[in-house]
Amino acid sequence: MESNWRFCNAFFEFKPAHPLRRGNLQRLPNTSPVLTCCLPLAGLIAAGAHGTCPPFVSCAPADFFVPDYYHEIAILDGANGYVAGCDEAGRGPLAGPVVAAAVILPVNTEIPGLDDSKTLTEKRREVLFEKIHECALAISVASQSAMTIDEVNIRQASLGAMRTSLAGLAITPSAALFDGRDIPVGLSANLRKQAIIGGDGRSMSIAAASII
């Protein structure tokens, strides 16, 4: 078991198994100590072929994930409050502003088909845009100009846009989830914060922000 764990850990990122995640074949109680391997399919096949995944690990490729409310519920940790998801658009283009959105959804609200905007067709994004506006408790959009981007760089401009969009929400959130590696500076010390790499494909709130 010890050697198997080391082998598996070299190939996979371990995440708590969640019944809402696509590809999580074992629908086990929340109290079950099951982990989900969620990195390369080649490594998954190799590990499975050699019997190297521990029995308490549920193996699933990374692209089996779909957005859910796992991170929203986890960051509140049993407390009451609202969670905002934040995402930006515009870091790819060579010119033009960077735009960010912040969205607060009622936890466990179902929005079928909601996912990372980059994976959806334009028609599907338009349908989801309307649905998000119907369901959301609060939505805010902010931008940073091309001039600001030139002055502070695209990364700082993106974080600034996310910070401004968060501040513009009509409801003050208790926590915020950010797509990517970074958390904007200057936020309230009382605000719970988490950056999630690939968050627009893992968190419903961030996915909603990516559509807006």
Image (cartoon, rainbow, N blue to C red):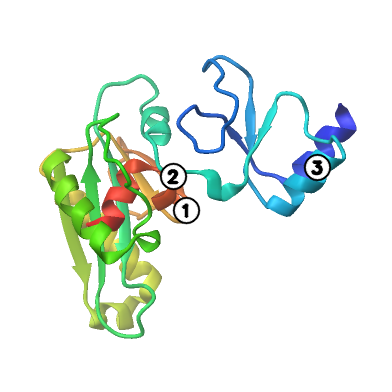
Report the amino acid beneath label 1: Gly
User: Which residue is located at x 46 percent, y 48 percent?
Assistant: 196
Report the amino acid beneath label 2: Arg
The location of residue 31, given as percent across then percent down, is: 55, 14
Sequence-wise, the earlier of marks 2 and 3 is 3
User: Which residue is located at x 54 percent, y 50 percent?
Assistant: 63
Label for residue 66?
A: none
Label 1 crowding class (10 Å Cα cut-off): few <14, some 14-19, many 20+? some
**Height in image: 116 above or below 72?**
below
Label for residue 198?
A: 1
* Tag 2–tag 1 contact (CB < 8 Å): yes
The residues tagged by marks 3 and 1 sit, at their Cα atoms, a distance apart of 24 Å
| Res 47 visible | yes
The residues tagged by marks 2 and 3 sit, at their Cα atoms, a distance apart of 24 Å
Helix, strand or loop under label 1:
loop
Discs 3/1, front? 3
Sequence-wise, the earlier of marks 3 and 1 is 3
Report the amino acid beneath label 3: Ala
Label for residue 202?
A: 2
Image quadrant containing the N terminus? top right
Q: Nearer the viewer, residue 39 or 84?
A: 39
Helix, strand or loop under label 2:
loop
Specify the quadrant of the image occupied by residue 172. top left
Residue beneath disc 3? 47
The answer to whether residue 18 is left or right of residue 108 is right
The residues tagged by marks 2 and 1 sit, at their Cα atoms, a distance apart of 7 Å
Q: Nearer the viewer, residue 116 or 170?
A: 116
**Height in image: 145 above or below 20?**
below
The location of residue 65, given as percent across then percent down, is: 50, 43
User: Which residue is located at x 52 percent, y 17 percent?
Assistant: 30
